[in-house]
Image (cartoon, grey):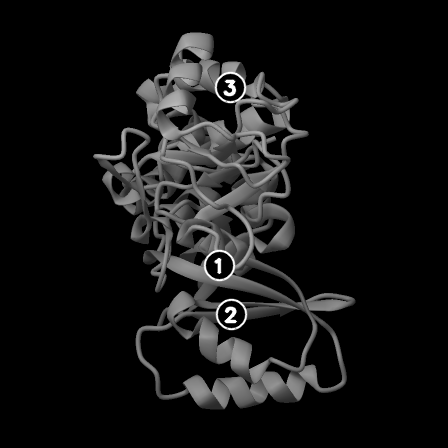
Amino acid sequence: MKYFILITITLILNMGTAMTENAYDHSFKSINEEDIIKLSDYKGKTIVVVNTASLCGFTYQYEGLQALYDTYSDKGLIIVGVPSNDFGNQESGDNEQVKDFCESTFNITFPLTEKNVVKGKNAHPFFQWSKKELGFIGGVPRWNFHKIIIDKNGNALAGFTALTKPSSKKFINEIEKALRKPARSGAIVMALKRISDNEEFLSTHRIVNVLRNLGDITVRSSLTDYCFKLSESLLLIQGKFLTEIRDKKDIFYTSSRGVGESNIVVSSNISSLLEEVFRREICIDKLDNLSAITVKLPTDNVKIPGIYYFIYKHNRFYAIMRTLVASEICNIEIP
């Protein structure tokens, strides 16, 4: 009988998770007061929603936003300008005056909405949603030209204040990262299957034999990683959670324990249950939109020195991920 050892590798992949509400649930009336700008019309694109004003010290950022739109629109970037008079009475004109100013002064070609309230209890529903998603700092405009990035799945990705120029390296890097194509499970599996065909492995025949007898390679998406601070009660709570999910089918669960923290990765469809069970524990960090690659290795691997070195330390897996990124298959940052 053959036994297998499981190696689970968790990667940040832009697979997306089901959400009860996202940006696609929101729309704006266009600045011409006739058309409707539905964010759902931009599914699969990266969207930047920015509240604007014509008489602000940051109004010059219109030029940078238009340059960004000119550069990346053919790659899937959409910019939606939302004029607002919420800050310093700096957008006091009517919609027609705002439109004329933007077109005549900055040659703006990206969509503009009618004037909207962007803060407080009367804020447009989009900004109420972004506050829930990104918090007060990222999701709530505190001045004109606050920029909110929406990923290709309609999720709120990040928010940048007016102090971050559209031309800043930090902002552009975030845009370029969001524009990368999502990973395709089949491409990852094929890349892993080809790992034993590389000539560098031929120098160690026994390693080649193991790699060519790999078991199943399974790719699972829609996972969430929670990092909890270690506590006296954490292990007991973890046991309670395992009892809760014992009879659930088609879910993913794995955990690891460090010196001061414990990581738990679960299927996103049971994340609400986990958060309820662990509500009294301290959550240090949470990452959504993850995937796990599970590789089965035959028992022979424990008898062969260097097998893990070749797969990991010898940059084979690293090289595969770099290849996927270079071909725009995978949305992973490789240093």
Q: Which residue is mark 1?
A: 8
Q: Which residue is mark 2?
A: 254
Q: Secondary structure at mark 1?
A: strand
Residue 214 locus on image (x, y percent): 36, 53
Q: Which mark is residue 184?
A: none
Q: Are marks 1 and 2 in contact (CB under 8 Å)?
A: yes
Report the number of numbered marks: 3
Q: Earlier in the sequence, mark 3 or mark 1?
A: 1
Q: Earlier in the sequence, mark 3 or mark 2?
A: 3
| Quadrant where the N terminus is found in the figure | bottom left
Residue 7 vertical position relative to residue 85 in the rendered view, above or below: below
Residue 313 vertical position relative to residue 240 in the rendered view, above or below: above
Disc 1 marks a residue whose amino acid type is Thr
Residue 188 locus on image (x, y percent): 35, 42
Disc 3 marks a residue whose amino acid type is Tyr
Q: Earlier in the sequence, mark 1 or mark 2?
A: 1
Say few, some or many: other residues with alpha carbon within 10 Å of mark 3 (under 14 / 14 to 19 / 20 or more): many
Task: Give the distance between the C-alpha atoms of the residues marked 1 and 2, in whole angstroms.
Answer: 9 Å
Disc 2 marks a residue whose amino acid type is Thr
Q: Residue at x 48, y 27 (%)?
A: 176
Q: Which residue is mark 3?
A: 62
Q: Secondary structure at mark 2?
A: strand
Residue 85 vertical position relative to residue 284 in the rendered view, above or below: above
* Most foreground residue, 38 or 10: 38
Q: Is residue 88 visible?
A: yes
Q: Secondary structure at mark 3?
A: helix
